[in-house]
Amino acid sequence: MGGVVQVLAVISAVGSGLVGGVFFGFSTFVMQALRRLPSAQGLAAMQAINVAAPNRGSWPRCSVRP
């Protein structure tokens, strides 16, 4: 039983690191690029990103399934 818990802990730690890396990359690169645009263009770009991003109903497709 201890081995299963240890494996799950490692998987959770790696998964958390990956998600954190995605958020770090977004805040570092995308937000810096949007900041360089004029306000109207930055707003239009962010709205286009929001339209293209997966919606709430599609999150199960992104999750790990058995």
Image (cartoon, rainbow, N blue to C red):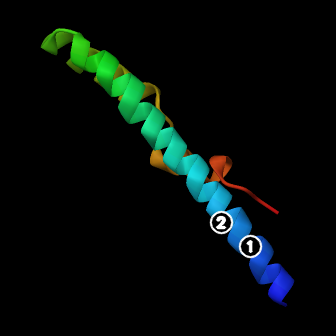
Single out the residue that lies furthest toward the left.
39
Residue at 16% in and 9% down: 38
Question: Where does the C terminus fall, quadrant-wise?
Answer: bottom right
Q: Which residue is mark 1?
A: 8
- Residue 3 place in picture, x, y as percent: 85, 82
Secondary structure of the residue carrying numbered label 2: helix
For the residue carrying disc 1, how many other residues have a C-alpha within 10 Å: few (<14), some (14-19), or many (20+)?
A: few
Asked which quadrant contains residue 28, the reply is top left
Residue at 53% in and 42% down: 21
Please give the count of numbered marks on the rendered protein. 2
Give 17 or 61, whichever is nearer the viewer.
Answer: 17
Give 25 or 49, whichever is nearer the viewer.
Answer: 25
* Picture layout, residue 30 above or below residue 66: above
Q: Which residue is mark 2?
A: 12
Q: Is residue 37 left or right of residue 7?
A: left
Asked which quadrant contains residue 16, the reply is bottom right
Question: Where does the N terminus fall, quadrant-wise?
Answer: bottom right
